[in-house]
Amino acid sequence: MLRDKLFAYHKWASQEILSHIEGLGEEIYTKEGDSSFPSIKETVSHVITVEKLWLLRMTGIAKPAAEQFGVDTAAEAKEAFMLLHAEMELYFSSLNEEQWQKLMKFTNLRGDSFEETREEMLFAFINHASYHRGQIVSLLRQFGKEGILTDYIYFPKENR
């Protein structure tokens, strides 16, 4: 199933980039650079907050409140993502195909109204995270560090 493969990829890519950052030292995680968010930490905080919002929307909460996560270190971020992704997997496993395709109404934090299927919401937050992983790699390069390849093509075939 494509959804399962994409979510497995998403979990892998999230952990890969955080493990890479963890190996570079915590000063890199909090160092400020030129991007949408001032640091890798702030970027990671944004991504996990948005992922939780998407999960809540998928469960039927039309206008969920943003939850703050303890992601002060790359290790804390890895753990927070593992826990959130486990929560997501449990929820996703409870859905049948009709529920995946059901239109859900929700309002984003800007107050804009939308109507999307759960499947489209899944694609939206995976794409969103991929975008920000690219920004993280750009920050790493600004700091004179190597990035890491997290494109789907690098996702190990045995995990697909």
Image (cartoon, rainbow, N blue to C red):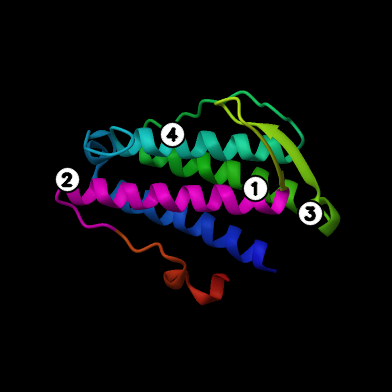
Q: Which residue is mark 2?
A: 143
Name the residue carrying label 4.
45
Q: Give left or right: position of 141 versus 21.
A: left
Q: CA distance from mark 1 to mark 3?
A: 10 Å
Which residue is nearer to you in this view: 40 or 87?
Answer: 40
Q: Residue at label 3?
A: 101
Q: Residues within 10 Å of mark 1 (few under 14, many from 20)?
A: some
Instruction: Please name whichever residue, 134 or 158, is drawn nearer the observer in this view of the structure.
Output: 134
Residue lying at 68% horizontally and 51% vertically, measured from the top left: 89
Of marks 1 and 3, which one's residue comes earlier in the chain? 3
Q: Secondary structure at mark 2?
A: loop
Examine the image and state in which quarter residue 35 appears: top left
Element class at badge 4: helix
Precedes in sequence: disc 4 or disc 3: 4
Q: Quadrant of the N terminus?
A: bottom right
Bounds of the magenta segment = 118-147
Q: From mark 4 to mark 2, how far is it between C-alphas?
A: 19 Å
Mark 4 surroundings within 10 Å by alpha-carbon count, few (fewer than 14), some (14 through 19), many (20 or more): some
The reply, left or right, for residue 34 in relation to residue 124 is left
Dot 4 or dot 1: first in sequence order is 4
Instruction: Please tell me which residue is depicted at 53% across the width and 62% down the height of the picture.
Output: 9
Residue 127 colored magenta? yes
Residue 76 position in % (x across, y down)? 43, 37
Whether residue 94 can be seen here: no
Q: Position of residue 75 (x, y in %)?
A: 40, 41
- Residue 125 location, x and y as percent? 56, 47
Q: Reply above or below: 90 against 73.
A: below
From the image, tell me which residue sits under label 1. 121
Name which residue type carries label 4.
Ser
Q: If you read the primary sequence from the N terminus, does the residue marked by circle 2 or circle 3 appear first? A: 3
